[in-house]
Amino acid sequence: MLDVQALRFGYNGQDVVNIENFQLRPRESMAVIGPSGCGKTTFLHLLAGLLKPSSGTIRVLDNDITAMSQAELDRFRGQHIGMVFQRLFLMPALTVRQNIELAQQMARRSRDASRVDSLLEQLGLAGFGQQKPRKLSQGQAQRVAIARALVHAPALVLADEPTSALDDERADDALTLLKDSAEASGASLLVVTHDQRVRGKLDLEFEMEPLK
C-alpha cells in the first residue's frame, strides 16, 4: 500500500524529514507519534503528494507519486487518498452534507446519500446535514472532516491530529470509526499525532523525533 525509501525533505539546507525506510500494508493502521516540531505533518503532506521531497521515493498502491505531474497527483489523490487535515478546510458556503459529498465528486464517483447518512449517524452528526460549518463546534467540525475523508472509500486514509479537539468519548469513537472504516474497505490508515490517547489503539506505532 505504502512504501517509502530514502525520503528527505528540508528548508534552507536543514532536513525536516529524513526517513530511510517506511512501509504500511493494506488494512494496517499506524500511529506516527512525536512531539510538535518533529516533522509529522510535513511527512504526512509528503505522503499525500502535497509536497515534493528533496530526494527519495514514495509509492502508493505501487505508483511512484514523486514522479507524477501536479495534475496526475491531484487526480490520484482525489480517487485513492482520504485526508483529515489539522486545519479542517471545510467550505463555509456549503452545508455539512455538501462538504462531505464534495469528496465523492472529487473522486469522480456518484453521490451516495446512504453512505453520507451512515457516516453522519456513526459520528453523532445526524440532523446536522443542512447546517453550515460556522454553526458547528470545533469537535463537530472535526467529525465532519473525518466523514469527508471516508465517504469515497479511499485506499489510504491520512489523518493529521484527528482527535485533538475531541473529548475522550468522541476521540475514541472517531478513532474507532477511522480504523473500522479503513479495515472494511481494505484501506490503510495513517494517523500522525502527539495525542497520547491514541497509543495502543492502532496496529502499529512509528515514533518521530526532531532532527538535530
Image (tube, grey):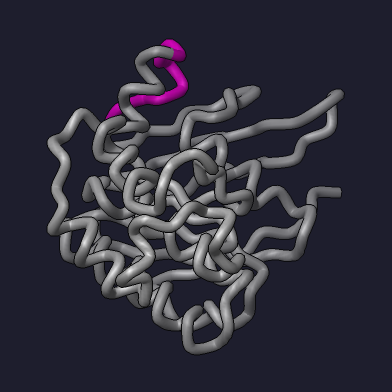
Location of residue 65 in the rendering, given as x and y in whole percent from the top left corner = 40, 25
Would you say residue 188 is visible in this rendering?
yes
> Is 202 placed left or right of 197 in the picture?
left
Taking the magenta stretch, the answer to whether it contains residue 63 is: yes
Q: Quadrant of residue 92?
A: top right
Location of residue 128 in the rendering, given as x and y in whole percent from the top left corner = 38, 65
Taking the magenta stretch, the answer to whether it contains residue 165 is: no
> Is 94 placed left or right of 28 in the picture?
right
Which quadrant holds the N terminus? Answer: top left
- Residue pictured at 45% horizontal, 83% vertical: 172
> Is 140 placed left or right of 76 in the picture?
right
Q: Nearer the viewer, residue 169 or 100?
A: 100
In the picture shown, does residue 125 fall above or below 107? below
Stretch in magenta:
62-70
- Residue pictured at 36% horizontal, 51% vertical: 148
- Residue pictured at 62% horizontal, 71% vertical: 165
Location of residue 163 in the rendering, given as x and y in whole percent from the top left corner = 55, 71
Residue at the extreme bottom of the image, as rendered: 169
- Residue pictured at 27% horizontal, 65% vertical: 119
Would you say residue 189 is visible in this rendering?
no
In the picture shown, does residue 73 fall above or below 58? above
In the picture shown, does residue 29 fall above or below 44? below
Image label count: 0
